[in-house]
Image (tube, rainbow, N blue to C red):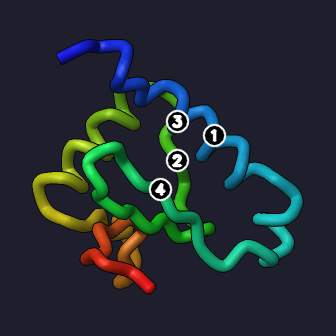
Amino acid sequence: MNPYNYRPDIIHEVLCRITDSLLCKSGRIQAIYVKTNEGVLITVEPNTHIPRTPQRFRNMMAELLQKFSVKAANKHGKLLRLVENPVT
């Protein structure tokens, strides 16, 4: 596999910028969707705290791909989850 095809640092930076934006903080973003090259669709809740270090972000994404969702530590909701395809 070509390592340049997999850039978790880019998606990490983009998610940090989106969740830190004024639009997100004012509640105008309802959901964030990420689609991988393999067609896996990930939904990210706008209130998700994206880890600031790339290593912790990679660990969170690995947990997502293994368990199909990432739950909040002190809440009942899911912060990240995989969505079944096809999506209309």
Residue at mark 2: 50
Please, is residue 59 above or below residue 43 in the view? above
Amino acid type of disc 4? Val
Amino acid type of disc 3? His
Contact check, label 3 and label 1, Cβ < 8 Å? yes
Judged from the image, the secondary structure of the residue bearing numbered disc 3 is helix
Q: Nearer the viewer, residue 51 or 35?
A: 35
The residue that appears at 24% across and 55% down in the rendered structure is 64
Q: Nearer the viewer, residue 86 or 68?
A: 86
Residue at mark 4: 34
Please, is residue 9 above or below residue 61 in the view? above
How far is the residue under mark 4 from the one under mark 3? Answer: 11 Å
Q: Nearer the viewer, mark 3 or mark 2?
A: 3
Q: Nearer the viewer, mark 2 or mark 4?
A: 4
Residue at mark 1: 14
The residue that appears at 13% across and 62% down in the rendered structure is 67
Residue at mark 3: 12
Amino acid type of disc 2? Ile
Q: Seen from this angle, which residue lies furthest left?
A: 66
Left or right placement of residue 1 versus residue 6 in this view = left
| Image quadrant assignment for residue 86 | bottom left
Q: How many neighbours does mark 2 have within 10 angstroms: few (below 14), some (14-19), or many (20 or more)?
A: many
Amino acid type of disc 1? Val
| Image quadrant assignment for residue 35 | bottom left
Left or right placement of residue 54 versus residue 49 in this view = left
Contact check, label 3 and label 2, Cβ < 8 Å? yes
